[in-house]
Amino acid sequence: MKKDIDWKNLDFGYIKTDYRFVSNYKDGKWDEGELIQDENIVLNECAGVLQYAQTCFEGLKAYETVDNKIVCFRPDLNAKRMEDSCKRLEMPVYPQEKFIEAIRKVVEKNADFVPPYGSGATLYIRPYMFGSNSVIGVKPAQEYQFRVFATPVGPYFKGGAKPIVIRISDFDRAAPHGTGHIKAGLNYAMSLHAIVDAHNQGFAENMYLDPATRTKVEETGGANFIFVTKDNEIVTPKSNSILPSITRRSLVYVAEHYLGLKVEEREVYKTELKDFKECALCGTAAVLSPVGKINDHGDEICFPSGMDNMGEITKKLYDTLVGIQLGRIEAPKGWIEVIK
């Protein structure tokens, strides 16, 4: 039986659910892990995560489909990306098959918190890992905790599909040979001042440029970019310091195989922005959020798609991907993990 929640008016925020999964790494191996009800974590004051930010995380969603199934979208890619993050941060890899099993357990036990089909809300799932033992010298921890919690959420941007205004930031999101390509907590800590400053200036998000030359488009603090040319071709920025978005990869496939569009992943220069007819942010939280304007230090780049609605191609991409996720459109093999 569904929980008594106002599903249509949910924010993108935390609501405690009944169960979460936890597994501990000690003496070179992971334990079996278990579902627990306590949402609190007790750590030593010198824990590796607190002293040297040794932590990474993932984000995915569970949905109720048109035929009343509860599903997750491509959790195998989240498992692989977390493996990449762990390797880069000198953390032990949580096995991919156990990662997916933990997701299944958490969603199954919190099924009453999965928002109903048609509500526009989803169950957001947050797997994460951190160094848990005391570390005072600058070195990797020896003990770790892998956890998964879930929380029902509304849209990431309160305006939903309404185009947003973003700015080109003077801050860098990641170093040229740093950790921008993995989902490390420290990347997001670096972006917090920039996003608060952007919000204070009246912008929804930041557009970060490449840190080496500051001439090429990278991403925002939490989403990749997708552009549409005047010839209806899809262009996505290519860079070694961009987080490889699972949503972006899925949209690229949808564009090519469902919509018959040409897609190009390449370096995108700031000087090209004025030539695109549509722009959108894509990621697990937002799915696709259209951009109406980019403010470049007072100069406005206005996309022909306007400030009222999603652009034509962006809307087709959005409708197709969401249709796949919600079971209205047949999914490519292996994309949908049926939970129950």
Image: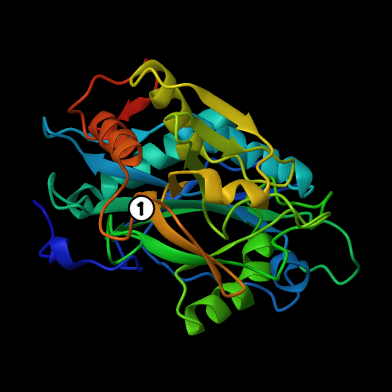
Which residue is at the far bottom?
200
The image position of residue 93, as x and y in percent, is 67, 39
Front position in the image: 36 or 103: 103
**In the image, is 165 to the left or to the right of 82?**
left
Residue for badge 1 = 124
Q: For the residue labelled by badge 1, is the local secondary structure a helix, a strand or a loop? A: strand
The image position of residue 156, as x and y in percent, is 36, 61
The image position of residue 19, as x and y in percent, is 34, 56
* Label 1 crowd (10 A; few <14 / some 14-19 / many >=20): many
**In the image, is 51 to the left or to the right of 191?**
right
Q: Amino acid at mark 1?
A: Tyr
| Residue at 11% in and 54% down | 2
Front position in the image: 294 or 274: 274
Q: How is the image coloured?
A: rainbow
Q: Quadrant of the rendered structure where residue 160 is?
A: bottom left
**In the image, is 228 to the left or to the right of 158?**
right
| Residue at 76% in and 57% down | 214
Looking at the rendering, in which quadrant would you find the C terminus?
A: top left
Which residue is at the far right?
137
**In the image, is 130 to the left or to the right of 114?**
right
